[in-house]
Amino acid sequence: MTRPIALDPYVVDVLMRDLVSHDHAPSAFLVYLWLWARTDGGRRRFAASLAGIAQETGLSKSSVQNAVRQLRQRRQLLAVTRDGPTTPPVYEVLKPWVRGRT
């Protein structure tokens, strides 16, 4: 069963164009959207393996790895932590454009 998700207008109006057109990384946008849905728009953290994300999004595992790297290192839109060497990464969706809003 699918459920509707609310997107910040910035995600569609600005971030999509930046990732897909400017960075040539549509897979990064897809992974960000998928994680956005799983974290309720960044309100909670979510653990998932790269293989799990790949299966859910229809991307290859290497595409997911590249997307996570892009979102984490270059764009700083994800925080990724691990509880241990054999546990899946825990993702936190970041929204830097929200800083400073009242």
Image: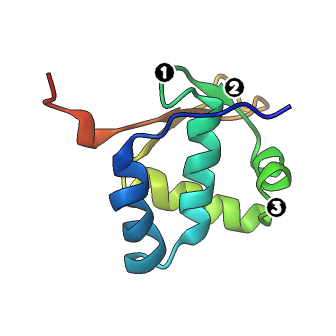
Where is 41 relative to 22, above or below? Answer: above
Judged by depth in the image, the label closer to the viewer, 3 or 2, is 3
Q: Tell me, yes or no, whether the two marked residues, 2 and 1, touch with CB atoms within 8 Å.
A: no
Q: Which of marks 3 and 1 is nearer the N terminus?
A: 1
Q: Quadrant of the N terminus?
A: top right
**Residue 81, visible in the rendered structure:** yes
Q: Where is residue 86 in the image (x, y as percent from the top left)?
A: 79, 31
Give the numbered dot on residue 58: 3
Q: Which-is-in-front pick, marks 2 and 1?
A: 1
**Of the numbered discs in the image, which one, if any, rests on residue 14?**
none
Q: Which kind of residue does numbered mark 1 sit on?
A: Arg
Task: Residue at 42%, 75% (x, y): give it.
Answer: 23
Q: Which residue is drawn at 76% across and 55% down?
A: 57
- Which comes before the other along the chain, label 2 or label 1? 1
Q: How far from the left and from the top, in percent, is residue 26?
A: 56, 70
Comparing 96 with 68, the one in front is 96
Left or right, 79 with reference to 81: left
Viewed as shown, does residue 70 lie left or right of 52? left
Q: In the image shown, does 73 or 21 lie closer to the viewer?
A: 21
Q: In this view, does 75 lie to the left or right of 4?
A: left
Residue at position x 48%, y 61% from top? 70
Above or below, 76 relative to 91: below
The amino acid pointed to by label 2 is Gly
